[in-house]
Image (cartoon, rainbow, N blue to C red):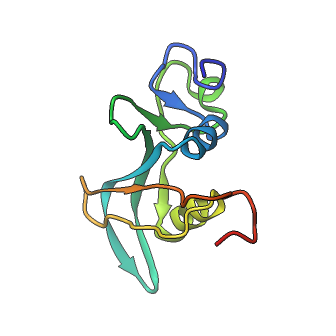
Amino acid sequence: MGSQSSEGAPNVVTETLFKTLIESACNAEVVCVQTAEKKSSVWYGAWIIRVVDPARTFEKLLVPARHHAAHGPEIVPRTFKTANGLISFLGSLGFTHITIPLYEGGRASHRLPSGNASDPSYR
C-alpha cells in the first residue's frame, strides 16, 4: 500500500490505490467542504472524498496523482467543484447510487455494489 501513497503523508491515496481499496470492501465517503448552490442547472460547491474501511479504523484522503511533485509536503485533496464532476468520477468507478451532501460538513458513505464492478455490463 505504501508505494501508492505519498511519502510523508500516510493518510492519503492516489486514484489507483483508491480504486483498489474500494474494490476490497472499503467505503468512499463524500464530504462537503463548501455549501453547494445551484446556478442555472448546475450545482456548484466543493467536495472531497475519503476511503474508509468498514470498521472505521482508518481513513485516507484522495489526492491528485501529481500531488507530491506539484505541492511538496503540503497535502492538497482532490476537490470536486460541481456535482456533475463528482457523479462522473464515482460513476466511472462503478458506484450505481450516489448521494451528495449539499451543506458544509455533510457526509455520505458509498459502497460498491457486490459483483464485478469493472464489468461494464454489470449494473
Residue 102, image x and y in percent?
30, 67
Number of on-image labels: 0
- Image quadrant of residue 35? bottom left
Residue 73, image x and y in percent?
50, 18
- Image quadrant of residue 107? bottom left
Quadrant location of the N terminus in the rendered image:
top right
Using the image, determine if residue 66 lies above or below residue 37: above
Q: Which residue is located at x 60 percent, y 18 percent?
A: 2
Q: Horizontally, is 101 left or right of 71 in the view?
A: left
Q: Which residue is located at x 63 percent, y 39 percent?
A: 20
- Image quadrant of residue 122? bottom right
Q: Which residue is located at x 56 percent, y 27 percent?
A: 71
Quadrant location of the C terminus in the rendered image:
bottom right
User: Looking at this rendering, what residue extends furthest in the front direction?
Assistant: 115
Residue 59, image x and y in percent?
39, 33
User: Looking at this rendering, what residue extends furthest in the bottom direction?
Assistant: 40
Using the image, determine if residue 67 lies above or below residue 26: above
Q: Nearer the viewer, residue 41 or 98?
A: 98
User: Looking at this rendering, what residue extends furthest in the top direction?
Assistant: 8
Q: Which residue is located at x 64 percent, y 25 percent?
A: 4
Q: Horizontally, is 65 left or right of 45 in the view?
A: right
